[in-house]
Amino acid sequence: MGHFLHEFFSPLDFLRSTPEVWNGFKLNLELMVVAEAFILVLALLLAIVRGLPGRAALPFRAAAILYTDVFRGTPLLLVLFMVQGFATLNYAGLSSGSLFRNGVIALVLVYTAYVTEVYRAGIESVHPSQRMAARSLGLSYMQSLRYVVLPQAIRRVVPPLLNDFIGLQKDTVLITVIGLTESLAQANFYQSDYANFTGLTVTAVFFIFLTIPLARFTDHIIRQRERRERAQVV
Amino acid sequence: MSENGQFVSLQGVRKRFDNLEVLHGIDLDIAEHSVVCLIGASGSGKSTLLRCINLLERVDAGTIVVDGQTITEGKVDVNRLRQKIGIVFQAYNLFPHMTVLQNVTLAPRKALGISRDKAQAHARALLRQIGLEDKAEEFPDRLSGGQQQRVAIVRALATGPKLMLLDEITSALDPQLIGEVLELVRELADSGMTMILATHEMSFAREVANKVCFLDAGVIHEEGTPSEIFSSPREERTREFLARVLEGGRL
Protein backbone atom coordinates (compact mmCIF):
# COMPACT_ATOMS: atom_id res chain seq x y z
CA MET A 1 0.00 0.00 0.00
CA GLY A 2 2.81 2.39 0.93
CA HIS A 3 4.50 1.48 -2.31
CA PHE A 4 1.36 2.26 -4.29
CA LEU A 5 0.91 5.62 -2.56
CA HIS A 6 4.50 6.50 -3.24
CA GLU A 7 4.24 5.56 -6.90
CA PHE A 8 1.07 7.60 -7.58
CA PHE A 9 0.75 10.18 -4.84
CA SER A 10 4.25 11.15 -3.79
CA PRO A 11 4.20 14.81 -2.66
CA LEU A 12 7.71 15.44 -3.87
CA ASP A 13 7.01 14.02 -7.30
CA PHE A 14 3.70 15.87 -7.39
CA LEU A 15 5.49 19.20 -7.01
CA ARG A 16 8.36 18.27 -9.26
CA SER A 17 6.23 16.99 -12.16
CA THR A 18 3.59 19.73 -12.04
CA PRO A 19 5.51 22.36 -14.10
CA GLU A 20 6.32 19.81 -16.79
CA VAL A 21 2.80 18.45 -16.96
CA TRP A 22 1.45 22.01 -16.99
CA ASN A 23 3.65 22.76 -19.99
CA GLY A 24 2.08 19.84 -21.80
CA PHE A 25 -1.38 20.65 -20.53
CA LYS A 26 -1.26 24.03 -22.21
CA LEU A 27 -1.18 22.14 -25.49
CA ASN A 28 -4.24 20.15 -24.45
CA LEU A 29 -5.99 23.43 -23.73
CA GLU A 30 -5.02 24.81 -27.12
CA LEU A 31 -6.16 21.66 -28.91
CA MET A 32 -9.42 21.84 -27.06
CA VAL A 33 -10.14 25.51 -27.71
CA VAL A 34 -9.22 25.43 -31.39
CA ALA A 35 -11.09 22.19 -32.05
CA GLU A 36 -14.18 23.32 -30.15
CA ALA A 37 -14.35 26.58 -32.09
CA PHE A 38 -14.39 24.69 -35.38
CA ILE A 39 -16.78 22.04 -34.10
CA LEU A 40 -19.35 24.52 -32.81
CA VAL A 41 -19.60 26.22 -36.19
CA LEU A 42 -19.26 23.20 -38.50
CA ALA A 43 -21.69 21.06 -36.52
CA LEU A 44 -24.30 23.82 -36.56
CA LEU A 45 -23.96 24.15 -40.33
CA LEU A 46 -24.30 20.40 -40.77
CA ALA A 47 -27.34 20.27 -38.50
CA ILE A 48 -28.95 23.03 -40.55
CA VAL A 49 -28.17 21.21 -43.78
CA ARG A 50 -29.69 18.01 -42.37
CA GLY A 51 -32.91 19.86 -41.65
CA LEU A 52 -33.27 21.57 -45.04
CA PRO A 53 -36.67 20.86 -46.59
CA GLY A 54 -37.50 19.88 -50.12
CA ARG A 55 -36.29 17.56 -52.80
CA ALA A 56 -33.60 19.92 -54.07
CA ALA A 57 -31.76 19.66 -50.76
CA LEU A 58 -31.80 15.86 -50.77
CA PRO A 59 -28.16 15.37 -51.90
CA PHE A 60 -26.97 17.77 -49.20
CA ARG A 61 -29.03 16.05 -46.54
CA ALA A 62 -27.68 12.68 -47.69
CA ALA A 63 -24.09 13.94 -47.58
CA ALA A 64 -24.57 15.27 -44.05
CA ILE A 65 -26.07 11.97 -42.90
CA LEU A 66 -23.24 10.01 -44.51
CA TYR A 67 -20.71 12.22 -42.76
CA THR A 68 -22.20 11.72 -39.30
CA ASP A 69 -22.60 7.98 -39.86
CA VAL A 70 -18.98 7.57 -40.93
CA PHE A 71 -17.29 9.72 -38.31
CA ARG A 72 -19.49 8.80 -35.40
CA GLY A 73 -18.78 5.18 -36.21
CA THR A 74 -15.01 5.42 -36.52
CA PRO A 75 -12.82 5.35 -33.39
CA LEU A 76 -11.00 8.63 -32.80
CA LEU A 77 -7.64 6.91 -32.53
CA LEU A 78 -8.15 5.37 -35.95
CA VAL A 79 -9.12 8.70 -37.49
CA LEU A 80 -6.07 10.25 -35.88
CA PHE A 81 -3.74 7.68 -37.43
CA MET A 82 -5.43 8.10 -40.80
CA VAL A 83 -5.11 11.88 -40.73
CA GLN A 84 -1.50 11.51 -39.69
CA GLY A 85 -0.90 8.94 -42.42
CA PHE A 86 -2.55 11.13 -45.01
CA ALA A 87 -0.38 14.06 -43.91
CA THR A 88 2.87 12.06 -44.15
CA LEU A 89 1.94 11.07 -47.70
CA ASN A 90 1.69 14.65 -48.75
CA TYR A 91 4.30 16.49 -46.78
CA ALA A 92 7.99 15.88 -46.25
CA GLY A 93 8.87 15.87 -42.57
CA LEU A 94 6.60 16.56 -39.62
CA SER A 95 6.91 19.68 -37.53
CA SER A 96 5.21 19.88 -34.15
CA GLY A 97 2.91 22.44 -35.78
CA SER A 98 1.66 19.86 -38.23
CA LEU A 99 1.19 17.36 -35.38
CA PHE A 100 -1.01 19.90 -33.63
CA ARG A 101 -2.92 20.54 -36.84
CA ASN A 102 -3.44 16.85 -37.49
CA GLY A 103 -4.67 16.40 -33.95
CA VAL A 104 -7.16 19.23 -34.38
CA ILE A 105 -8.37 17.80 -37.69
CA ALA A 106 -8.99 14.37 -36.18
CA LEU A 107 -10.82 15.82 -33.17
CA VAL A 108 -12.92 18.09 -35.38
CA LEU A 109 -13.82 15.30 -37.80
CA VAL A 110 -15.05 12.98 -35.07
CA TYR A 111 -16.62 15.40 -32.62
CA THR A 112 -18.40 17.41 -35.31
CA ALA A 113 -20.37 14.26 -36.05
CA TYR A 114 -21.46 13.98 -32.41
CA VAL A 115 -22.24 17.63 -31.95
CA THR A 116 -24.26 17.74 -35.19
CA GLU A 117 -26.60 15.20 -33.65
CA VAL A 118 -26.85 17.25 -30.47
CA TYR A 119 -27.79 20.37 -32.41
CA ARG A 120 -30.22 18.42 -34.52
CA ALA A 121 -31.98 17.05 -31.47
CA GLY A 122 -32.22 20.63 -30.16
CA ILE A 123 -33.66 21.95 -33.40
CA GLU A 124 -36.22 19.16 -33.53
CA SER A 125 -37.23 19.80 -29.92
CA VAL A 126 -38.55 23.25 -30.81
CA HIS A 127 -42.27 22.82 -31.44
CA PRO A 128 -43.23 23.16 -35.12
CA SER A 129 -45.79 25.80 -34.16
CA GLN A 130 -42.90 28.16 -33.36
CA ARG A 131 -41.55 27.90 -36.86
CA MET A 132 -45.06 28.16 -38.26
CA ALA A 133 -45.69 31.33 -36.25
CA ALA A 134 -42.45 32.84 -37.54
CA ARG A 135 -43.22 31.91 -41.14
CA SER A 136 -46.75 33.25 -40.83
CA LEU A 137 -45.30 36.65 -39.91
CA GLY A 138 -43.55 36.73 -43.28
CA LEU A 139 -40.11 35.69 -42.10
CA SER A 140 -38.18 33.49 -44.54
CA TYR A 141 -37.13 29.94 -43.75
CA MET A 142 -33.64 31.04 -42.79
CA GLN A 143 -34.86 34.01 -40.76
CA SER A 144 -37.24 31.77 -38.84
CA LEU A 145 -34.40 29.37 -38.17
CA ARG A 146 -32.01 32.07 -37.09
CA TYR A 147 -34.23 34.22 -34.90
CA VAL A 148 -36.81 31.77 -33.59
CA VAL A 149 -35.72 28.13 -33.83
CA LEU A 150 -31.96 28.20 -33.21
CA PRO A 151 -31.94 30.47 -30.15
CA GLN A 152 -34.39 28.13 -28.44
CA ALA A 153 -32.66 25.00 -29.72
CA ILE A 154 -29.17 26.04 -28.67
CA ARG A 155 -30.05 26.96 -25.13
CA ARG A 156 -31.71 23.59 -24.72
CA VAL A 157 -28.62 21.71 -25.84
CA VAL A 158 -26.09 23.53 -23.68
CA PRO A 159 -25.86 20.66 -21.15
CA PRO A 160 -25.39 17.84 -23.70
CA LEU A 161 -23.03 20.10 -25.64
CA LEU A 162 -20.93 20.58 -22.54
CA ASN A 163 -20.96 16.86 -21.98
CA ASP A 164 -19.51 16.25 -25.43
CA PHE A 165 -16.89 18.91 -24.84
CA ILE A 166 -15.78 17.31 -21.60
CA GLY A 167 -15.32 14.14 -23.64
CA LEU A 168 -13.35 16.07 -26.20
CA GLN A 169 -11.12 17.69 -23.59
CA LYS A 170 -10.18 14.31 -22.24
CA ASP A 171 -9.65 12.85 -25.69
CA THR A 172 -7.01 15.49 -26.44
CA VAL A 173 -4.55 13.22 -24.58
CA LEU A 174 -4.90 10.72 -27.43
CA ILE A 175 -2.99 13.11 -29.65
CA THR A 176 0.07 12.01 -27.68
CA VAL A 177 0.28 8.84 -29.79
CA ILE A 178 1.25 10.75 -32.92
CA GLY A 179 4.08 12.37 -30.99
CA LEU A 180 2.70 15.67 -29.70
CA THR A 181 4.24 16.48 -26.33
CA GLU A 182 1.10 17.30 -24.42
CA SER A 183 0.38 16.58 -20.76
CA LEU A 184 0.19 12.79 -20.95
CA ALA A 185 3.47 12.67 -22.88
CA GLN A 186 5.05 14.87 -20.21
CA ALA A 187 3.75 12.58 -17.48
CA ASN A 188 5.21 9.59 -19.30
CA PHE A 189 8.54 11.35 -19.68
CA TYR A 190 8.51 12.07 -16.01
CA GLN A 191 7.78 8.44 -15.28
CA SER A 192 10.69 7.23 -17.37
CA ASP A 193 13.02 9.81 -15.83
CA TYR A 194 12.09 9.26 -12.18
CA ALA A 195 10.41 5.86 -12.19
CA ASN A 196 7.33 7.38 -10.56
CA PHE A 197 3.73 7.60 -11.79
CA THR A 198 2.68 10.69 -9.86
CA GLY A 199 2.88 12.72 -13.06
CA LEU A 200 -0.17 10.81 -14.28
CA THR A 201 -2.06 11.80 -11.14
CA VAL A 202 -1.11 15.41 -11.74
CA THR A 203 -2.43 15.16 -15.29
CA ALA A 204 -5.70 13.70 -14.01
CA VAL A 205 -6.01 16.53 -11.50
CA PHE A 206 -5.55 19.10 -14.23
CA PHE A 207 -8.36 17.57 -16.28
CA ILE A 208 -10.67 17.26 -13.33
CA PHE A 209 -10.10 20.86 -12.33
CA LEU A 210 -10.82 21.93 -15.87
CA THR A 211 -14.19 20.20 -16.13
CA ILE A 212 -15.70 20.96 -12.74
CA PRO A 213 -15.87 24.76 -13.06
CA LEU A 214 -17.17 24.39 -16.61
CA ALA A 215 -20.00 22.17 -15.41
CA ARG A 216 -20.91 24.58 -12.60
CA PHE A 217 -20.76 27.52 -15.00
CA THR A 218 -23.22 25.81 -17.35
CA ASP A 219 -25.59 25.08 -14.47
CA HIS A 220 -25.41 28.72 -13.54
CA ILE A 221 -26.24 29.92 -17.06
CA ILE A 222 -29.18 27.58 -17.33
CA ARG A 223 -30.58 28.69 -14.00
CA GLN A 224 -30.16 32.35 -14.87
CA ARG A 225 -32.15 31.97 -18.08
CA GLU A 226 -34.85 29.99 -16.33
CA ARG A 227 -35.26 32.75 -13.79
CA ARG A 228 -35.50 35.38 -16.47
CA GLU A 229 -38.02 33.67 -18.72
CA ARG A 230 -40.16 31.44 -16.56
CA ALA A 231 -43.30 32.66 -14.95
CA GLN A 232 -43.00 33.32 -11.29
CA VAL A 233 -46.27 32.99 -9.51
CA VAL A 234 -46.17 35.58 -6.78
CA MET B 1 -59.62 44.04 -54.88
CA SER B 2 -60.29 41.06 -57.11
CA GLU B 3 -62.45 41.09 -60.19
CA ASN B 4 -65.67 40.20 -58.46
CA GLY B 5 -65.18 43.03 -55.99
CA GLN B 6 -64.18 40.75 -53.14
CA PHE B 7 -61.04 41.08 -51.05
CA VAL B 8 -60.67 37.35 -50.63
CA SER B 9 -62.22 34.88 -53.00
CA LEU B 10 -62.05 31.10 -52.81
CA GLN B 11 -63.29 28.83 -55.56
CA GLY B 12 -63.49 25.06 -55.40
CA VAL B 13 -60.75 24.81 -52.79
CA ARG B 14 -59.81 21.26 -51.96
CA LYS B 15 -57.21 20.06 -49.50
CA ARG B 16 -56.27 16.55 -48.51
CA PHE B 17 -53.90 15.16 -45.92
CA ASP B 18 -52.76 11.73 -47.02
CA ASN B 19 -56.04 9.91 -47.67
CA LEU B 20 -58.28 12.29 -45.83
CA GLU B 21 -59.83 15.12 -47.77
CA VAL B 22 -60.36 17.91 -45.26
CA LEU B 23 -61.79 20.50 -47.62
CA HIS B 24 -64.16 19.27 -50.34
CA GLY B 25 -64.53 22.25 -52.59
CA ILE B 26 -64.96 25.50 -50.71
CA ASP B 27 -66.41 28.61 -52.36
CA LEU B 28 -66.24 31.72 -50.26
CA ASP B 29 -66.14 35.47 -50.86
CA ILE B 30 -65.08 38.06 -48.34
CA ALA B 31 -65.62 41.74 -49.02
CA GLU B 32 -63.09 44.30 -47.88
CA HIS B 33 -63.70 45.60 -44.33
CA SER B 34 -66.04 42.75 -43.57
CA VAL B 35 -65.88 40.12 -40.87
CA VAL B 36 -66.62 36.51 -41.72
CA CYS B 37 -67.07 33.92 -38.98
CA LEU B 38 -66.51 30.24 -39.64
CA ILE B 39 -68.42 28.03 -37.27
CA GLY B 40 -68.60 24.28 -37.08
CA ALA B 41 -67.45 21.35 -35.02
CA SER B 42 -63.80 20.56 -34.44
CA GLY B 43 -62.40 18.81 -37.48
CA SER B 44 -64.81 20.48 -39.87
CA GLY B 45 -61.94 22.17 -41.70
CA LYS B 46 -62.05 25.70 -40.28
CA SER B 47 -58.37 25.85 -39.33
CA THR B 48 -57.21 24.24 -42.54
CA LEU B 49 -59.24 26.75 -44.52
CA LEU B 50 -57.55 29.66 -42.72
CA ARG B 51 -54.11 28.13 -43.22
CA CYS B 52 -54.73 27.75 -46.93
CA ILE B 53 -55.42 31.46 -47.24
CA ASN B 54 -51.93 32.45 -46.08
CA LEU B 55 -50.32 29.43 -47.75
CA LEU B 56 -49.27 27.70 -44.55
CA GLU B 57 -51.03 24.86 -46.36
CA ARG B 58 -51.02 24.38 -50.13
CA VAL B 59 -54.37 23.63 -51.70
CA ASP B 60 -54.72 20.55 -53.89
CA ALA B 61 -57.30 22.11 -56.18
CA GLY B 62 -59.21 25.35 -56.63
CA THR B 63 -58.14 28.96 -56.60
CA ILE B 64 -57.68 31.55 -53.90
CA VAL B 65 -57.46 35.24 -54.76
CA VAL B 66 -56.32 37.69 -52.11
CA ASP B 67 -56.28 41.41 -52.78
CA GLY B 68 -56.35 40.83 -56.54
CA GLN B 69 -53.52 38.31 -56.49
CA THR B 70 -54.12 34.68 -57.34
CA ILE B 71 -52.03 32.92 -54.73
CA THR B 72 -52.72 29.34 -55.72
CA GLU B 73 -50.91 29.31 -59.04
CA GLY B 74 -47.57 30.36 -60.42
CA LYS B 75 -44.73 31.63 -58.34
CA VAL B 76 -45.94 33.48 -55.28
CA ASP B 77 -43.68 35.31 -52.85
CA VAL B 78 -45.11 33.71 -49.71
CA ASN B 79 -43.18 35.99 -47.37
CA ARG B 80 -44.59 39.11 -49.01
CA LEU B 81 -48.07 37.60 -48.97
CA ARG B 82 -47.88 36.70 -45.30
CA GLN B 83 -46.83 40.21 -44.36
CA LYS B 84 -50.21 41.30 -45.74
CA ILE B 85 -52.09 38.59 -43.87
CA GLY B 86 -51.89 38.33 -40.10
CA ILE B 87 -52.80 35.07 -38.43
CA VAL B 88 -53.36 34.38 -34.75
CA PHE B 89 -53.45 30.87 -33.36
CA GLN B 90 -55.32 29.18 -30.56
CA ALA B 91 -52.07 28.51 -28.66
CA TYR B 92 -50.72 32.11 -29.06
CA ASN B 93 -47.33 30.76 -30.25
CA LEU B 94 -45.40 33.70 -28.89
CA PHE B 95 -41.62 33.28 -28.98
CA PRO B 96 -40.70 32.37 -25.39
CA HIS B 97 -37.06 33.47 -25.64
CA MET B 98 -38.00 37.03 -26.62
CA THR B 99 -39.58 39.84 -24.67
CA VAL B 100 -43.00 41.13 -25.66
CA LEU B 101 -41.35 44.02 -27.48
CA GLN B 102 -38.98 41.70 -29.34
CA ASN B 103 -41.88 39.46 -30.30
CA VAL B 104 -43.75 42.39 -31.79
CA THR B 105 -40.77 44.00 -33.56
CA LEU B 106 -39.18 40.86 -35.02
CA ALA B 107 -41.17 40.71 -38.27
CA PRO B 108 -41.18 44.48 -38.94
CA ARG B 109 -37.41 44.59 -38.46
CA LYS B 110 -36.33 41.40 -40.19
CA ALA B 111 -39.04 40.84 -42.79
CA LEU B 112 -39.85 44.46 -43.62
CA GLY B 113 -36.44 45.93 -42.88
CA ILE B 114 -37.77 48.70 -40.64
CA SER B 115 -35.19 50.23 -38.31
CA ARG B 116 -35.10 49.09 -34.72
CA ASP B 117 -36.10 52.48 -33.33
CA LYS B 118 -39.05 52.88 -35.67
CA ALA B 119 -40.21 49.32 -35.12
CA GLN B 120 -40.03 49.75 -31.35
CA ALA B 121 -41.87 53.04 -31.39
CA HIS B 122 -44.64 51.50 -33.49
CA ALA B 123 -44.76 48.40 -31.28
CA ARG B 124 -44.99 50.50 -28.12
CA ALA B 125 -47.82 52.51 -29.63
CA LEU B 126 -49.70 49.32 -30.45
CA LEU B 127 -49.05 47.92 -26.97
CA ARG B 128 -50.26 51.18 -25.44
CA GLN B 129 -53.54 50.85 -27.34
CA ILE B 130 -54.19 47.50 -25.72
CA GLY B 131 -52.94 48.63 -22.33
CA LEU B 132 -49.89 46.41 -22.24
CA GLU B 133 -47.12 48.95 -22.71
CA ASP B 134 -45.81 48.23 -19.23
CA LYS B 135 -45.31 44.58 -20.23
CA ALA B 136 -43.03 45.43 -23.16
CA GLU B 137 -39.89 44.13 -21.46
CA GLU B 138 -41.51 41.03 -19.95
CA PHE B 139 -41.14 37.53 -21.31
CA PRO B 140 -44.38 35.90 -22.52
CA ASP B 141 -44.47 33.24 -19.81
CA ARG B 142 -44.97 35.95 -17.22
CA LEU B 143 -48.19 37.14 -18.84
CA SER B 144 -51.68 35.76 -18.42
CA GLY B 145 -53.21 33.81 -21.29
CA GLY B 146 -55.40 36.75 -22.25
CA GLN B 147 -52.44 39.11 -22.25
CA GLN B 148 -50.39 36.67 -24.32
CA GLN B 149 -53.12 36.34 -26.89
CA ARG B 150 -53.50 40.12 -27.14
CA VAL B 151 -49.74 40.40 -27.66
CA ALA B 152 -50.03 37.74 -30.38
CA ILE B 153 -52.71 39.84 -32.09
CA VAL B 154 -50.54 42.94 -31.87
CA ARG B 155 -47.58 40.96 -33.21
CA ALA B 156 -49.67 39.96 -36.21
CA LEU B 157 -50.79 43.58 -36.68
CA ALA B 158 -47.26 44.97 -36.55
CA THR B 159 -46.49 44.25 -40.20
CA GLY B 160 -49.58 46.25 -41.22
CA PRO B 161 -51.69 43.41 -42.64
CA LYS B 162 -54.83 44.06 -44.66
CA LEU B 163 -56.43 40.81 -43.62
CA MET B 164 -56.49 39.04 -40.26
CA LEU B 165 -57.12 35.34 -39.79
CA LEU B 166 -58.09 34.36 -36.26
CA ASP B 167 -58.01 30.66 -35.55
CA GLU B 168 -60.10 29.91 -32.45
CA ILE B 169 -58.11 32.44 -30.53
CA THR B 170 -60.15 32.20 -27.34
CA SER B 171 -60.42 28.42 -27.16
CA ALA B 172 -57.40 27.98 -24.90
CA LEU B 173 -58.38 30.76 -22.52
CA ASP B 174 -60.02 30.65 -19.13
CA PRO B 175 -63.56 32.06 -19.38
CA GLN B 176 -62.71 35.20 -17.42
CA LEU B 177 -59.90 36.04 -19.88
CA ILE B 178 -61.93 35.69 -23.05
CA GLY B 179 -63.57 39.10 -22.74
CA GLU B 180 -60.40 41.17 -23.04
CA VAL B 181 -59.39 39.32 -26.21
CA LEU B 182 -62.81 39.61 -27.82
CA GLU B 183 -62.86 43.30 -26.94
CA LEU B 184 -59.68 43.78 -28.95
CA VAL B 185 -61.14 41.86 -31.90
CA ARG B 186 -64.26 44.02 -31.70
CA GLU B 187 -62.13 47.17 -31.89
CA LEU B 188 -60.31 45.73 -34.89
CA ALA B 189 -63.63 45.04 -36.60
CA ASP B 190 -64.80 48.57 -35.84
CA SER B 191 -61.59 49.95 -37.37
CA GLY B 192 -62.52 48.27 -40.65
CA MET B 193 -60.07 45.37 -40.63
CA THR B 194 -61.05 42.56 -42.95
CA MET B 195 -61.16 39.42 -40.82
CA ILE B 196 -61.93 35.75 -41.02
CA LEU B 197 -62.55 34.11 -37.67
CA ALA B 198 -62.85 30.47 -36.84
CA THR B 199 -64.69 30.54 -33.57
CA HIS B 200 -66.84 28.71 -31.05
CA GLU B 201 -68.01 31.99 -29.52
CA MET B 202 -71.47 32.12 -31.10
CA SER B 203 -72.70 35.24 -29.38
CA PHE B 204 -69.57 37.06 -30.44
CA ALA B 205 -69.95 35.81 -34.00
CA ARG B 206 -73.52 37.05 -34.00
CA GLU B 207 -72.38 40.45 -32.81
CA VAL B 208 -69.38 41.19 -35.07
CA ALA B 209 -69.86 39.08 -38.19
CA ASN B 210 -71.16 40.38 -41.49
CA LYS B 211 -71.36 36.83 -42.68
CA VAL B 212 -71.43 33.50 -40.89
CA CYS B 213 -70.46 30.24 -42.59
CA PHE B 214 -71.27 26.86 -41.14
CA LEU B 215 -68.67 24.28 -42.07
CA ASP B 216 -69.39 20.62 -41.80
CA ALA B 217 -67.11 17.82 -42.99
CA GLY B 218 -65.12 20.08 -45.27
CA VAL B 219 -67.93 21.93 -47.03
CA ILE B 220 -69.68 25.19 -46.32
CA HIS B 221 -73.10 23.84 -45.53
CA GLU B 222 -74.83 27.12 -45.08
CA GLU B 223 -73.85 30.77 -45.14
CA GLY B 224 -75.72 33.96 -44.43
CA THR B 225 -76.02 36.93 -42.15
CA PRO B 226 -75.78 36.19 -38.44
CA SER B 227 -79.51 36.51 -37.97
CA GLU B 228 -80.18 34.15 -40.88
CA ILE B 229 -77.82 31.51 -39.51
CA PHE B 230 -78.56 31.84 -35.83
CA SER B 231 -82.26 32.67 -35.86
CA SER B 232 -83.56 30.82 -38.86
CA PRO B 233 -81.08 28.29 -40.22
CA ARG B 234 -82.34 26.56 -43.34
CA GLU B 235 -80.29 23.40 -43.11
CA GLU B 236 -81.02 20.57 -40.74
CA ARG B 237 -77.31 20.11 -39.95
CA THR B 238 -76.90 23.74 -39.02
CA ARG B 239 -79.85 23.46 -36.68
CA GLU B 240 -78.40 20.34 -35.09
CA PHE B 241 -75.02 21.96 -34.61
CA LEU B 242 -76.50 25.10 -33.08
CA ALA B 243 -78.72 23.03 -30.83
CA ARG B 244 -75.69 21.15 -29.58
CA VAL B 245 -73.78 24.36 -28.96
CA LEU B 246 -76.82 25.81 -27.22
CA GLU B 247 -76.86 22.85 -24.87
CA GLY B 248 -73.21 23.55 -24.16
CA GLY B 249 -74.31 26.96 -22.98
CA ARG B 250 -72.30 28.90 -25.48
CA LEU B 251 -74.98 30.95 -27.15
Image (cartoon, grey):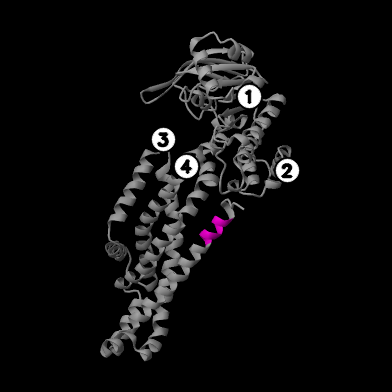
- C-alpha span from label 2 to label 1: 32 Å
Q: Determine if marks 2 and 1 fall on one subunit.
A: yes
Q: Chain of mark 2?
A: B
**Is label 2 or label 4 in front?**
4
Q: Which residue is mark 2?
A: B121
Say left or right for A220 vs A200. Answer: right
Instruction: Indicate which disc, 3 or 4, sits on the residue closer to the N terminus.
Output: 3
Q: Which residue is mark 4?
A: A127
- Evaluate whether label 3 is on the same chain as label 1: no
Separation of marks 3 and 4 at Cα, in angstroms: 20 Å
Give the residues in magenta.
A221-227
x and y, in percent, of residue A147 in the image: 55, 46
Q: Mark 3 — on which chain does it sit?
A: A
Give the label, 3 or 4, closer to the camera. Answer: 4
Residue at the spot of label 3: A54
> Which amino acid, mark 3?
Gly
Vertical relation: A170 (above or below) B240 = below
Residue A136, percent from left and from top: 55, 34
Cα separation, mark 2 vs mark 4, equals 30 Å
- CA–CA distance between discs 2 and 3? 38 Å
Height in image: A52 above or below B198? below
Residue in view at x 36 percent, y 62 percent: A107
Question: Looking at the image, can residue B62 be seen?
Answer: no
Q: Which mark is residue B204?
A: 1
Q: Which mark is residue B157?
A: none
Circle 2: element type? helix
Q: In whole angstroms, how far apart are the C-alphas of marks 4 and 1?
A: 31 Å
In the image, residue B220 sits, relative to residue A188, either above or below, namely: above
Residue at mark 4: chain: A
